[in-house]
Image: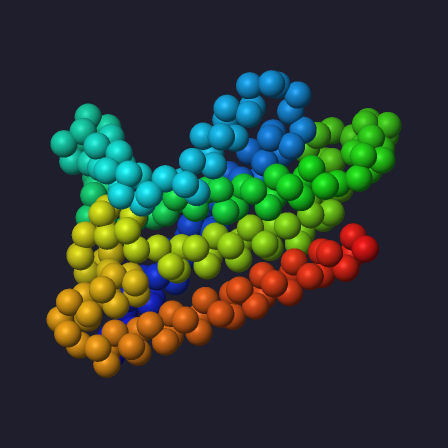
Amino acid sequence: MDYTPFLITLKLAFSTALFLLIIAVPISYFLAFSKWKGKIIVESLLMLPIILPPTVLGFYFLTFLGPESSIGQFFNDVFGISFAFSFEGILLGSIIYCTPFMITPITNGFRGIPRNIVESTYLFKKSRLNALWYVFLPSIKRSIWSGILLTFAHTIGEFGIVLMIGGKMQETKVASVAIYDEMNNLNYNAANQYALILLSISFVLILLLTFLTQKNRSDVA
């Protein structure tokens, strides 16, 4: 059995979780603490990937960033980056697709910080950056880990969005696509091996996520 699809899958999952963590913290902070009424529109747009089929996201991704689009041609001509049938493409698609799974737990974590802690940062005239780094983030570390695990697990299970954007190229063939290919080739033994490994990884991630959730509930109680 070729283990390359698992290496690509893990690379995609780690990269997606890392990039989303970097952008999710400031976005979640804004959603949790901003008093701007229009933020509900921003939050709704960020949550769209939860209900949109992967085919819809993949279609619009290729429409706006594919080789025939002006944006896609710009990145290809200037930076030499193609967002279709490349690892960079499935990474960007995965970031868009997994955004709600990172932002939701972190935003809820910020919103769950006791009001007296938030007000104390104002009382001691801490800057927003200092309050975020030294007070808020340590208070929601379990929410952050929940977001990381959710994003990682969801990325591992991605199929439709990766298949549409990445096709069946060697550098974009993740484990879920490998299972699909082996099934089409009637190679059920190989498909079963891929599926069992993917099932085991997913189970461990869900176990860790459940443990974190129960710890949060016990701390609240």
Residue at position x 69%, y 37% in the image = 111
Given residues 198 and 132, the one toward you in this image is 198
Render colour scheme? rainbow
Residue at position x 67%, y 51% in the image = 141
Residue at position x 67%, y 29% in the image = 33
The answer to whether residue 49 is above or below residue 128 is below
For residue 68, side relative to residue 113 (left or right): left
For residue 11, side relative to residue 38 (left or right): left
Residue 109 position in % (x across, y down): 67, 44
Residue 19 position in % (x across, y down): 46, 45
Q: Is residue 198 visible?
A: yes
The answer to whether residue 36 is above or below residue 200 is above
The answer to whether residue 197 is above or below residue 208 is below
Given residues 59 and 166, the one toward you in this image is 59
For residue 153, side relative to residue 27 (left or right): left
Quadrant where the N terminus lies? bottom left
The answer to whether residue 145 is above or below residue 181 is above
In the orientation shown, which residue stands out farthest toward the top? Answer: 37
Residue 112 position in % (x across, y down): 72, 41
Residue 30 position in % (x across, y down): 60, 29
Disc tally is: 0
In the picture, residue 182 is in which quadrant?
bottom left
Residue at position x 18%, y 29% in the image = 69
Given residues 34 and 135, the one toward you in this image is 34
Q: Is residue 72 visible?
A: no
Quadrant where the C terminus lies? bottom right
